[in-house]
Image (cartoon, grey):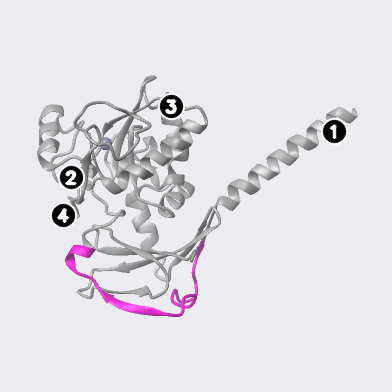
Amino acid sequence: MKKWAILLLSIVAIIAISHLLITSSEINIEPLASPKLAEIEDWEEMTLSQSEISKGDLLLVNHEHPISELALPENVINLYDQNQFDLNFGLMNTDLWLPERMVLPFIEMIEEANSVGIHDFLMTSGFRGFASQEQLYEEKGSEFALPAGYSEHHLGLALDVGSKNGLMSEATEGKWLAKNAWKHGFILRYPEHKTDITGISYEPWHFRYVGLPHSAIMYEHDLVLEEYIEYVSGYQEGLLVTVNAKDYLILYYSLDTDEKQIHVPVNYPYEISGTNVEGIIVTIDLNV
Ligand SMILES: [Zn+2]
């Protein structure tokens, strides 16, 4: 074999191996066999209120599980009528709303797309109140819309995003988001091959915020939210997750008993989310 051919093959091999290493080092998921409390020394017990159980980024809202009124978002802003944020995506109309805290994660995700030359995003829907969902349901019918109370859009965590260049299933914008949204805490909520589980037909435009590290695990294991909650509930001792060199501990508590007590660490930041299916997920950020 000629020298240049060997050199070329070596380069290809090196690229392939390093690509494999990069891909596998991005996400590492390790179910904990030992008691979940072992790694962190100081814990405190916490009794949750109904309101705390009803909120969070991991709430499941679908045909069978309507949203609790306690889960409705706070500080919802109109995106058209604000000057707080410099939006890097188009707005389909003036009636687009999001909770204030959701705007930046979305902008940051689009910023990454922009950096690789993908620009033509168009937001078509965000937070929807019960009245506008009811109107949509009446206009579109049960095949294309959910009745009021059963849509993820009520949570303020779901966004419909289109492309100025055509269908999201074909446009670069849609393809990029489907592949990269997880890095920013978002997931493609209704994939084509999971319609039997979600009960919703393929929606390449509908993205849901669940936050990291959850979006990474869902992407890595190809799980929709229905499956993911089930998956986490199977690891009662906890899941240790590393995403892009950051470590998280995920704990699951079942709430099918009357006890609403959980353990939270004293010295680490954490987030609590209800699941809307008799569970609580505590996400502990170990990077302090
Ligand atoms: Zn949607």
Where is mark 2, residue-wise?
150
Q: CA distance from mark 2 to mark 4?
A: 10 Å
Where is mark 4, residue-wise?
68
Q: CA distance from mark 1 to mark 4?
A: 63 Å
Q: Horizontally, is 22 left or right of 195 in the view?
A: right
Q: CA distance from mark 1 to mark 3?
A: 40 Å
Determine if the C-beta at disc 4 is less than 8 A from ligand 1: no
Determine if the C-beta at disc 2 is less than 8 A from ligand 1: no
Q: Is residue 233 above or below residue 34?
A: above
Image depth: mark 4 or mark 3 in front: 3
Where is mark 1, residue-wise?
6
Q: Horizontally, is 129 left or right of 277 in the view?
A: left
Where is mark 3, residue-wise?
119
Q: Is residue 200 above or below residue 210?
A: above
**Chain-order first, disc 1 or disc 2:** 1
Ligand 1: which quarter?
top left
**Chain-order first, disc 4 or disc 3:** 4
- Picture coordinates of residue 283, whole percent (x, y): 39, 63
Question: Which amino acid type corresponds to the residue marked 4 in the rendered image?
Answer: Ser
- Does any portion of residue 1 appear in the rendered image? no
Under circle 4, the secondary element is loop
Q: Which residues are magenta?
A: 30-52
Question: Which amino acid type corresponds to the residue marked 3 in the rendered image?
Answer: His
* Residue 38 magenta-highlighted: yes
Question: Which amino acid type corresponds to the residue marked 2 in the rendered image?
Answer: Tyr
Residue located at (13% from left, 33% from top): 137
Image depth: mark 2 or mark 3 in front: 3
- Picture coordinates of residue 89, whole percent (x, y): 36, 30
**Chain-order first, disc 2 or disc 3:** 3
For residue 249, what is the image quadrant? bottom left
Residue located at (24% from left, 63% from top): 278
Q: Specify few, some or many for label 1: CA neighbours under 10 Å numbering under 14, 14-19, or 20 or more.
A: few
